Image (cartoon, rainbow, N blue to C red):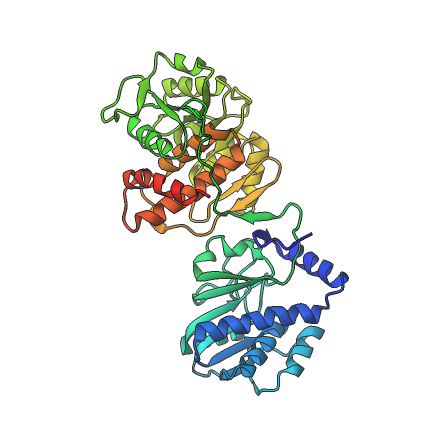
């Protein structure tokens, strides 16, 4: 097996992966050398000649710090090492013995350019003791640049929980061997700064979650026509403006034909968008490749009827917004589905499917995906995707400017468009989430949902091979 730099591991899986490397003939000390020297190199480059203070804990994260300090000394960088606790593992003891510089006591609070936090890594499950928390805060105040080894100390790796409220923010977090869930989960993620990954040779772990990456979206075939590229039906409801936003984004996301199904033609329908209804008789068109239902649908009896008709058509479907409150275990249809709840809609779905609503966001999304037999894109500042078979995709932080009314309608339209192109729900959710984030990046700050929809075509261009 080869190293997989997109996988996201929990603590147990990371330890097991390291054990495989060690059993295969790579000494644990050699792994520490690779990780520590990479940390030292990041500190050297980012510090640009400034002095570095390395805060070392008792475990192997501290051992990485001693190796980093040795690397910095070898390159002529002024370095100070503070041993917050004496080493307790064989590898950390060896790393300290190989470092020939002075090691200061925890009472030291030197000034410096760079603080390298090697106090505790991904194994921490309880808050830092008061003395170590105070030491970390004090050192952060005395340094201008903060770098964390693997994870900032005081973060729980699996959930992203901040174990010590008031932790300092870091400029860079250098993940060691593999990404951890906390790198992408709230509330920890904003404390991480820029994320970097050191490859220590960890093999791919079957079933591991993965980071959302840029898709490769091919142009239509040379002989393509509008139906072959995908006909998407967008069902409008009581508030057709939301469906119009979705349709506009869908038109720019690859589908060859987007049709708005509205009981009455709403104002502002562009000439490029076909508007039809006939009591949803258009859903009987066998050329329809996918359906989007939910944006602006409403929750009336009429909305419920339109929702049931959408599912009864038995086409691949994206279920968003109001439609999520109407979904039940006995809802009709067996075609592939993508559910796109935010936190409030997620709670309603969990109640409808009699789920416990406990655990991490990814655990909850997986539980819903299995219960509903649907791909679930749980939206938020730490969006993630879960599939019924257990696959999980976590998303890097996207622009906070996406927190604008209508942003979710745009996302639903993009996903539905991609679903109409190829019919793969899990792939469509990934492509849609990436394109949504890229469209926001290209918009810059303070955009409207209309701006975001208009930028979708630029995002699609960025995903071309």
Q: Is residue 136 visible from the viewing direction of this image?
A: no
User: What's the residue at 58%, 38% (across, down)?
Assistant: 367
Q: State the image coordinates of residue 135 (x, y, percent, origin top left).
A: 49, 76
Quarter holding residue 248 = top left
Image position of 271 (left or right of 79):
left
Q: Is residue 16 visible from the viewing direction of this image?
A: yes
Quarter holding residue 60 = bottom right
**Along the viewing direction, whichever of 216 and 442 lies nearer the viewer:** 216
Image position of 48 (left or right of 202):
left
Residue 403 position (above or below residue 191): above
**Along the viewing direction, whichever of 42 and 463 lies nearer the viewer:** 463
Quarter holding residue 62 = bottom right
Q: State the image coordinates of residue 418 (x, y, percent, origin top left).
A: 45, 33
Residue at the extreme front of the image, as rendered:
222
Q: State the image coordinates of residue 217 (x, y, percent, origin top left).
A: 47, 39
Q: State the image coordinates of residue 52 (x, y, percent, origin top left).
A: 48, 79
Image position of 14 (left or right of 24):
left
Residue 307 position (above or below residue 143): above
**How many numbered marks are there?**
0
Residue 43 position (above or below residue 341): below
**Along the viewing direction, whichever of 372 and 73 lies nearer the viewer:** 73
């Amino acid at each position: 097996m080869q190293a997989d730099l997109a996988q996201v591991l929990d603590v147990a899986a990371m330890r097991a992966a390291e054990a495989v490397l060690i059993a295969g003939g790579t000494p644990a000390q050699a792994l520490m050398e690779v990780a520590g020297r990479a940390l030292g190199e990041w500190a050297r480059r980012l510090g640009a000649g400034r002095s570095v203070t390395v805060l070392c804990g008792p475990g192997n994260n501290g051992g990485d710090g001693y190796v980093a300090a040795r690397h910095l000394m070898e390159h002529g960088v002024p370095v100070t090492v503070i041993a917050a606790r004496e080493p307790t593992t064989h590898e950390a003891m060896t790393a300290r013995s190989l470092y020939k510089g002075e090691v200061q006591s925890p009472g030291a609070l030197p000034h410096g350019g760079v603080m390298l936090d090697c106090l505790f890594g991904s194994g921490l499950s309880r808050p830092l003791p008061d003395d170590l928390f105070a030491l970390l805060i004090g050192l952060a105040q005395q340094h201008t640049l903060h770098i964390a080894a693997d994870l900032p100390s005081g973060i729980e790796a699996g959930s992203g929980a901040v174990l010590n409220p008031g932790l300092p923010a870091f400029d860079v977090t250098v993940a060691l061997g593999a990404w951890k869930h906390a790198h992408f989960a709230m509330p920890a993620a904003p404390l991480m700064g820029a994320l970097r990954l050191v490859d220590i040779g960890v093999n791919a772990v079957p079933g591991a979650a993965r980071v959302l990456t840029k898709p490769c979206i091919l142009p239509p075939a040379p002989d393509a026509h509008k139906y072959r590229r995908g006909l998407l039906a967008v069902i409008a409801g009581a508030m057709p403006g939301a469906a119009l936003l979705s349709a506009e984004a869908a038109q720019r996301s690859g589908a060859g034909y987007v049709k708005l199904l509205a009981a009455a033609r709403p104002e502002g329908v562009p000439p490029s968008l076909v508007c039809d209804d006939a009591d949803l008789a258009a859903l009987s068109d066998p050329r329809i490749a996918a359906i989007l239902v939910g944006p602006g649908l409403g929750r009336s009896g009429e909305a419920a009827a339109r929702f049931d008709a959408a599912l009864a058509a038995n086409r691949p479907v994206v279920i968003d917004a109001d439609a999520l409150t109407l979904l039940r275990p006995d809802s009709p249809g067996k075609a592939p589905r993508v559910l796109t709840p935010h936190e409030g809609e997620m709670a309603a779905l969990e109640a409808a499917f009699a789920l416990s609503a406990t655990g991490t966001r990814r655990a909850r999304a997986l539980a819903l995906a299995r219960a509903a037999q649907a791909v679930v894109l749980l939206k938020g500042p730490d969006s993630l995707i879960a599939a019924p078979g257990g696959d999980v995709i976590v998303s890097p932080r996207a622009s906070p400017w996406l927190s604008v009314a209508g942003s979710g309608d745009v996302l639903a339209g993009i996903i539905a468009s991609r679903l109409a192109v190829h019919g793969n729900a899990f792939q469509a959710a990934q492509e849609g989430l990436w394109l949504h984030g890229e469209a926001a990046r290209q918009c810059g700050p303070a955009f409207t949902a209309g701006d975001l929809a208009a930028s979708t075509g630029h995002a699609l261009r960025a995903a071309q091979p």
